[in-house]
Image: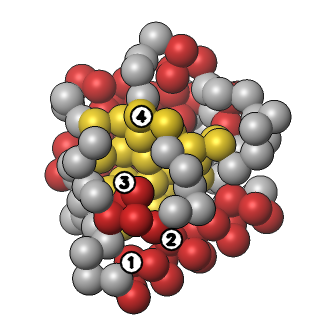
Amino acid sequence: MSDLFISYQSADPLAHSFQVQLQKWADKYWEFPSVSFHEQEPPVCFNCASANRIRRHLRKEIKAANQLLIIISRATWQSEWTDWEISTAQDADKQLLAAKLDSTNISPIGLVDTAPIWIDPFDPIVLAQRKF
C-alpha cells in the first residue's frame, strides 16, 4: 500500500511522462511519499460485471492511502472511474489533491462539489510535505 494514490491517464503523453517523473522522485527522495498509480481508464468498462473486482481492489488501495492525487489530463473529465475514485476517497475521509498538467484541461465532475487542494505538479517539495 502507499501514502499517495495517484490517478492518471497513461494514454496522455504528458501524464505518462509525469507518472515516470513521480516514480523517480519517490525512488530518489526518502521524504517523498510512497506512491501507487491507477489508470483512469482501465481496459474494463465501468459498469461491466468484471469491473467489480477492480473497484474492490481500488477501494482497498484508496482506504489504505493517506491522500488521493488526481492528475487532470485532456480526457479526465470524461472518466467514470475518476469520479468514482473521488467519491470513494471522500467516503473514506481521505485528503484530495488535484493537479492540472495543462491549464486548458477540464476538471472531472467529481471535483466540482469537493474542495481539493490544488498543487503544482512539477514541484516535488509540495508532494513531500504529505499534509496540507
* Front residue (pair 130, 12): 130
Is 128 left, or right, of 79 in this rendering?
A: left
Q: Can residue 32 be seen in this view?
A: yes
Is 30 left, or right, of 104 in this rendering?
A: left
Secondary structure beneath label 4: strand
Residue type highlighted by circle 3: Phe
The structure residue drawn at horizontal position 20% and vertical position 44%, both measured from the top left corner, is 63
Disc 2 crowd, CA 10 A, few/some/many (<14, 14-19, 20+): many
Q: Quadrant of the N terminus?
A: bottom left
Secondary structure beneath label 3: strand
Is 69 left, or right, of 41 in this rendering?
A: left
Residue occupied by mark 1: 26
Q: Earlier in the sequence, mark 4 or mark 2?
A: 2
Residue occupied by mark 2: 22
- Which of label 1 and label 4 is nearer to you? 4
Q: Toward which corner of the image does residue 39 lie, by quadrant?
A: bottom right
Secondary structure beneath label 1: helix
Across and down, in percent, residue 5 comes to 36, 54
Q: Are discs 1 and 4 less than 8 Å apart at CB?
A: no
